């Protein structure tokens, strides 16, 4: 959470409608305060010698006549060209003769032109580079070196050493000075016009009278002019302001102890004066620095709030991604469970179809087994009927034989005996055959009974297997019901987790909105002007003390303003609190 911005000011500046001490406003530049006169200089310091204002001139004087100015310009231009021509001619002749005497030969005719034309070309290049805001000091230095060389060469032109005939050397050296002065005048005029066309104010130069009357203070004045690009009039005005301000502090704190009693902010003009600061600008430095510090703090608070918002937004995105992943996982689990349930349903249907087929095959097998049992029983009954029929026939035959034996006993003794023997043999063979057939039928019947019993045992075993399969199917159905119940419980838990994640996302959104509101509040505090700062201070005072305790006089003392300004700030604060309260009443609670 970003720290609250302190809206208090350490050293409030006086309002425009309040009286200011006379030494804090020394008046316009170049004009000392007429009510107090010139300040008395300190011991050991030199008095100021400002330039006297020029005496007013009449409109018909030469300085204001355009025709006279044009005439002077023509005279200066023509005269300058004449002087330059005379100086160039004399310099050319002297340098040519000097070069011939030094063995230059035919180059003696070009040597003077190279030096003098080099001065013109280098100065012209210097002016051009200055006009293009690309100054190159070496051009001017080289031109000055060529100027010194020209004067030296002309002074050395007379035969013999220079010191043997100083007058002749001076006469030769003066000739090129005319040309050099004319060229420097033209350069100065063109350079000044270039500065004026570029919108720059010429710095001017310190008058010679000031250098003579106050050399020490003039040296510092000239230094500030060159270092900080101050015009002469502004530098003199700042010098006067600092003297007047010093005199005011002396009158306020005493002549001897004013440096020890004055506050650090009041001594700032003396510390910043060597750096080109005026009194007003020096006194405004603390408030300006405090304003910059508050702005930096507000910018830092805004940046921290934005970083916090980005952090929360990233957290929300991560949480949303986690929620989406959880939802996808739950959806995949649900789809997997649905697929498992579908597979189990298909397996259950397949098992049911297999059981139905098994039941159908079992019923067909039982029906076939019953048919076989009925057929076996019918065959056993047929065999029993056949054996009974044979016993009845044998008995009938025996009765017939006994009857025939009684009637034909005398006639057929031999035949009867033979017939009886044959009949007995046949009956014995037939009985043996019947017994063998009966035994075979019994064996076959036993085999059929054993097969039927085996089939019955197999049917019982298959019925037991069917019961076991049915029990397993019921167990699987119970397990499927239990798994379905677990699926329903997991689905309900997933829905609960999803609701909780939605609630957490809503909380994150609420925190984002809160941080955005704090960032907007910090940005609004950073864009406040002086009136808004004062209004916020009065709002804080009313919240802390109550509206009845915060009077106009208290506000004026706290803010350092007039009562009218304090009344306006209080009205603004009450209006602002009324908007915040919603019912127009001022809350009587402590400010956070």
Image (cartoon, grey):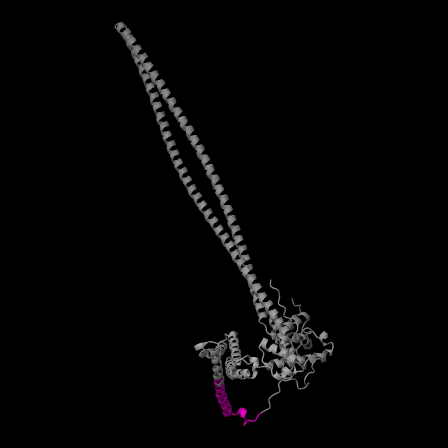
Q: Residue furthest bottom?
A: 60
For image coordinates 41% across by 40% down, the residue present is 350
In percent of width and height, residue 380 lies at 35, 23
Q: Is residue 395 visible?
A: no
In percent of width and height, residue 353 lies at 40, 39
Magenta: predominant secondary structure element? helix
205, 537: nearer the viewer: 205
> Which range is magenta?
57-85
Q: Please indicate whether residue 151 sits to the left or right of residue 286 in the image.
A: left
49, 77: nearer the viewer: 77
Image vertical order of residue 267 relative to residue 450, above or below: below
Residue 309 lies within the magenta run: no
463, 564: nearer the viewer: 564
For image coordinates 54% across by 82% down, the residue present is 169
Q: Residue furthest left?
A: 411
- Quadrant of the image occupied by residue 394: top left
Q: Quadrant of the N terminus?
A: bottom right
In percent of width and height, residue 425 lies at 30, 10
- Quadrant of the image occupied by residue 512: bottom right
In percent of width and height, residue 549 lies at 69, 73
Residue 74 lies within the magenta run: yes
Q: Please indicate whether residue 179 sits to the left or right of residue 261 in the image.
A: left
- Quadrant of the image occupied by residue 578: bottom right
Number of marks:
0
Image vertical order of residue 570 relative to residue 478, above or below: below
Q: Is residue 501 visible?
A: yes
Q: Quadrant of the C terminus?
A: bottom right
């Amino acid at each position: 959470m970003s720290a609250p911005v302190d809206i208090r000011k350490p050293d409030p500046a006086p309002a425009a409608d309040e009286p200011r001490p006379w030494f804090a406003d020394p008046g316009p530049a170049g004009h000392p305060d007429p009510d107090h006169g010139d300040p008395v200089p300190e011991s050991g310091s030199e008095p100021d010698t400002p330039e006297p204002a020029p005496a007013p001139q009449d409109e018909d004087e030469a300085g204001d006549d355009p025709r006279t100015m044009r005439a002077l310009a023509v005279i200066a231009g023509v005269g300058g060209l004449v002087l330059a021509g005379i100086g160039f001619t004399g310099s050319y002749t002297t340098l040519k003769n000097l070069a011939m005497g030094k063995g230059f030969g035919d180059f003696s005719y070009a040597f003077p032109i190279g030096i003098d034309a080099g001065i013109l070309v280098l100065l012209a290049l210097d002016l051009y580079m200055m006009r293009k805001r690309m100054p190159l000091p070496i051009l001017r230095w080289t031109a000055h070196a060529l100027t010194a060389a020209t004067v030296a060469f002309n002074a050395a032109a007379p035969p013999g050493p220079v010191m043997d005939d100083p007058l002749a050397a001076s006469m030769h050296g003066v000739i090129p000075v005319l040309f050099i002065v004319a060229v420097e005048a033209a350069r100065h005029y063109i350079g000044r016009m270039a500065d004026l066309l570029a919108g720059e104010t010429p710095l001017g130069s310190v008058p010679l009278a000031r250098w003579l009357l106050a050399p020490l203070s003039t040296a510092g004045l000239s230094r500030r002019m060159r270092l900080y690009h101050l015009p002469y009039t502004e530098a003199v005005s700042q010098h006067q302001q600092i003297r007047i301000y010093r005199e005011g502090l002396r009158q306020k704190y005493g002549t001897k102890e004013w440096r020890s009693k004055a506050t650090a902010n009041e001594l700032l003009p003396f510390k910043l004066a060597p750096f080109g600061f005026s009194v007003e600008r020096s006194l405004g430095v603390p408030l300006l620095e405090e304003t910059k510090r508050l702005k930096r703090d507000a910018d830092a608070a805004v940046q921290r709030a934005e970083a916090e918002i980005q952090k929360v937004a990233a957290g929300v995105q991560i949480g949303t991604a986690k929620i989406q992943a959880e939802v996808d996982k739950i959806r995949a689990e649900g789809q997997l469970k649905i697929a498992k349930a579908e597979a189990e349903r298909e397996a259950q249907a397949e098992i049911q179809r297999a059981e139905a087929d098994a039941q159908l095959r079992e019923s067909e097998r039982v029906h076939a087994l019953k048919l076989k049992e009925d057929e076996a029983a019918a065959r056993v009954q047929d065999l029993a009927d056949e054996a009974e029929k044979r016993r009845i026939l044998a008995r009938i035959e025996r009765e017939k034989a006994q009857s025939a034996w009684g009637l034909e006993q005398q006639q057929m003794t031999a035949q009867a005996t033979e017939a009886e023997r044959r009949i007995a043999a046949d009956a014995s063979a037939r009985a043996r055959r019947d017994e063998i057939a009966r035994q075979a039928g019994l064996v076959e019947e036993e085999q059929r009974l054993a097969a039927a019993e085996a089939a019955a045992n197999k049917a019982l075993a298959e019925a037991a297997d069917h019961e076991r399969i049915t029990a397993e199917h019921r167990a699987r159905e119970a397990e499927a019901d239990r798994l379905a119940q677990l699926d329903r419980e997991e689905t309900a838990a997933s829905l609960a987790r999803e609701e909780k994640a939605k609630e957490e996302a809503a909380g994150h959104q609420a925190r984002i909105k809160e941080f955005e509101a704090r960032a907007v509040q910090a940005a609004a505090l950073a864009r406040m002007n002086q009136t808004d700062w004062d209004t916020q201070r009065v709002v804080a005072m009313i919240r802390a003390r109550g509206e009845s305790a915060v009077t106009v006089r208290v506000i004026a003392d706290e803010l350092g303003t007039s009562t009218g300004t304090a009344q306006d700030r209080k009205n603004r604060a009450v209006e602002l609190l009324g908007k915040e309260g919603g019912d127009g009443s001022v809350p009587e609670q402590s400010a956070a």
